[in-house]
């Protein structure tokens, strides 16, 4: 996938990953296997059992440990010589400021929430670091690239708001199971166990039609001496029986709809004078309130069984009872959480009883939990594909160049960076849509003269000034090599260590060209190989890439180096237009000295 030059760039790149979850695990693995060697990773979470099915760097024994750290250790096992720096922290924390972001060539997001994505987007804009953003939902996924001044940023397009439903559909006329879930979770659960002061549309139908709002409150309040089972039955009859009866009295509503059926406790538990459902003792083994379960109490195990109306009713009453008996302290402060077993059981049962009333198909706990938690179950393969796409984008990582833009000239970039370090022989340099420099046989003399004049100008004094934050695009058609260079202005350089007054990061010279600092031929161009062979001796094979067509007689010195010594033993490749139709490629084998011509279409 990557050419040798690209591979060198990958090795030198410093990459920040945010999120070590479903996408993050895949991404870290793929980055490491693609040759990235300096990876920093931020994740604020610890590993949960529910992560293990797809976050494959984690094992049962890691539950409770930092995702970033465990992910690092897991990858170092198969790539021991690379550097991975983990941060078990929130990316919104003060340590991760603009300066922190500036050190990276690219930032890769594997997050799961808008808030953190927006935050990272803003920091990347401020630090002028490219961002590769990603997301998956089930079988769908996307990867987008955001570069300041070049592309839309993450917030340029409004993001769809989470799906909402009209209140009346939820409170009075549900037609889908999701409506029953929203009712059970956002209205009934919130009313019984959440903040009493919060607005709640359940009020609308909670008292008899003529009652005052004071009375309405009382319906859901457990009276001081009220037996818990009695309280449960009262709530049951009120929300599934009485309220439906009230709703039915509005004939208009049901003209074009199926009429719901009120459900009362006595209808379900006909011959059972006392409710004999739960065995709270089944929960006694544990003191951990978060593991209390109504399913366990009533002896039901499989979350993928659809319960009957009677079973749902038992779970409903049992869950209500357990909240009061085992988790009383939390009542008044609870919000629905998809990872709270008892809450999920309560909401599933309540939604199913309501669904029965309205003739809507019942669902099992697993499905109900998915709907209630807005969960689309993650698909490991989607994450893997998306991670691969992120890496492909990351490989196009821009280089960053520190230079004193008030002193250095454009020629310094052309000679010291583009030709010498990047090994381009026939480059063009673009600043946005402005061409700062180009080479080519078809250029007229005036144009060449103007480029020569530009080349001698100080960077910041160009008509289209090159200053800190400028992104230059450098292109060499002959090499099919194109990269972006992020300019960072710097006043001072260490005369000993940085005598050129330039620091190029994100680029390491390919081993074969390290000793050659002169203008190079296009020998870097085509050779493509994969994996470790990239580091091996220079490949004898050259893949031929078509470039601009020109006649041999027109090939100027800038593509065929005059210094034969410099290119001795190296293959040179030039694309010609020998006759009118065919492209000809001349290979100059340094050793034999013989010119070979290869014809290709
Ligand atoms: N502000 C943040 N700072 C650091 N890491 C974050 C932040 N917000 C989210 N994350 C991390 O992003 C990752 C998102 O991955 P993913 O959603 O696949 O995992 P998960 O949240 O553990 O799984 P699930 O969503 O299924 O419970 C999580 O590991 C989470 O900790
Ligand atoms: Zn998540």
Image: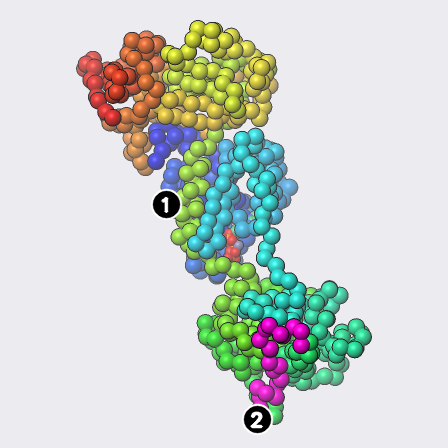
Q: Name the residue under label 2.
A: 271
Location of residue 178 by image quarter = bottom right
Residue drawn at (72%, 75%), measured in percent from left and top? 206
What's the coloring here?
rainbow
Left or right, residue 356 beside residue 423: right
Q: Is 592 in front, or is 209?
A: 209
Q: Is mark 2 on a helix, strand or loop?
A: loop
Q: How many marks?
A: 2
Residue 244 at least partly seen = yes
Q: Name the residue under label 1.
A: 78
Q: Is 257 in front, or is 195?
A: 257
Left or right, residue 570 beside residue 459: left
Which quadrant is the N terminus positioned in?
Answer: top left
Residue 350 at least partly seen = no
Vertical arrangement, residue 88 with respect to residue 375, above or below: above
Residue drawn at (25%, 21%), measured in percent from left and top? 582
Is residue 264 in the magenta section? yes
Vertical arrangement, residue 423 with respect to residue 145, above or below: above
Left or right, residue 534 beside residue 427: left
- Residue 70 lies, in percent from the top left, at 47, 50
Q: What element carries label 1?
A: helix
- Residue 421 lies, in percent from the top left, at 42, 20
Which quadrant is the C terminus positioned in?
Answer: top left
Give the mark nearest the N terminus, 1 or 2: 1
Q: What segment is highlighted magenta in the picture?
A: 251-272
């Amino acid at each position: 996938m990557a050419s040798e030059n690209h591979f060198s760039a990958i090795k030198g790149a410093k990459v920040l990953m945010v999120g070590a979850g479903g996408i993050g695990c895949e991404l870290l693995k793929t980055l490491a296997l693609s040759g990235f060697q300096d990876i920093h990773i931020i994740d604020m979470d610890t590993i949960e059992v529910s992560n293990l099915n797809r976050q494959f760097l984690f094992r049962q024994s890691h539950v409770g440990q930092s995702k970033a750290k465990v992910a690092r250790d897991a990858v170092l096992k198969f790539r021991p010589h690379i550097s991975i720096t983990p941060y078990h922290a929130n990316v919104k924390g003060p340590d991760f400021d603009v300066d922190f972001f500036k050190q990276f060539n690219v930032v890769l997001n594997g997050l799961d929430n808008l808030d953190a994505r927006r935050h990272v987007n803003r920091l990347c804009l401020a630090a002028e670091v490219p961002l590769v953003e990603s997301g998956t939902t089930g079988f769908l996924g996307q990867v987008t690239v955001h570069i300041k001044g070049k592309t839309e940023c993450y917030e340029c397009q409004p993001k769809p708001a989470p799906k909402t439903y009209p209140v009346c559909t939820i409170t009075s006329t549900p037609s889908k199971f999701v409506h029953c879930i929203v009712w059970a979770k956002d209205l009934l659960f919130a009313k019984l166990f959440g903040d009493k002061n919060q607005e709640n549309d359940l009020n609308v139908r909670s008292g008899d039609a003529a009652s005052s709002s004071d009375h309405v409150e009382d319906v859901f309040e457990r009276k001081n001496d009220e037996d818990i089972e009695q309280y449960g039955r009262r709530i049951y009859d009120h929300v599934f029986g009485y309220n439906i009866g009230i709703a039915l009295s509005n004939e208009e509503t049901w003209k074009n709809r199926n009429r719901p059926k009120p459900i009362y406790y006595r209808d379900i538990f006909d011959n059972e004078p006392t409710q004999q459902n739960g065995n709270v003792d089944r929960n006694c083994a544990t003191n951990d309130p978060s593991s209390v379960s109504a399913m366990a109490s009533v002896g039901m195990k499989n979350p993928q069984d659809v319960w009957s109306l009677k079973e749902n009713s038992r779970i409903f009453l049992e869950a209500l009872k357990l909240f009061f008996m085992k988790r009383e302290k939390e009542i008044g402060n609870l919000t629905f959480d998809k990872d709270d077993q008892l809450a999920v059981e309560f909401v599933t049962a309540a939604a199913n009883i309501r669904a029965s009333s309205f003739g809507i198909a019942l669902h099992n706990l697993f499905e109900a939990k998915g709907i209630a938690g807005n969960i689309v179950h993650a698909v490991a393969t989607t994450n893997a594909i998306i991670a691969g796409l992120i890496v492909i984008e990351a490989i196009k990582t821009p280089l960053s160049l520190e230079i004193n833009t008030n002193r250095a000239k454009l020629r310094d970039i052309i000679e010291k960076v583009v030709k010498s370090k990047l090994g381009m022989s026939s480059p063009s340099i673009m600043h946005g849509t402005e061409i700062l420099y180009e080479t080519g046989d078809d250029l007229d003399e005036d144009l060449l003269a103007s480029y020569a004049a530009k080349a001698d100008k100080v960077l910041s004094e160009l008509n289209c000034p090159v200053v800190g934050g400028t992104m230059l695009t450098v292109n060499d058609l002959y090499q099919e090599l194109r990269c972006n260079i992020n300019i960072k202005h710097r006043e001072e350089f260490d005369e000993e260590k940085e005598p050129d007054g330039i620091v190029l990061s994100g680029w390491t010279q390919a081993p074969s060209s390290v000793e050659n600092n002169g203008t190079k031929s296009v020998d870097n161009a085509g050779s493509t190989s994969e994996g470790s062979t990239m580091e091996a001796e220079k490949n004898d094979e050259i893949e031929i890439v078509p470039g601009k067509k020109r006649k041999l007689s027109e090939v100027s010195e800038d593509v065929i180096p005059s210094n034969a010594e410099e290119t001795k033993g190296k293959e040179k490749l030039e694309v010609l237009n020998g006759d009118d139709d065919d492209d000809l490629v001349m290979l100059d084998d340094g050793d034999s000295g013989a010119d070979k011509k290869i014809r290709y279409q």
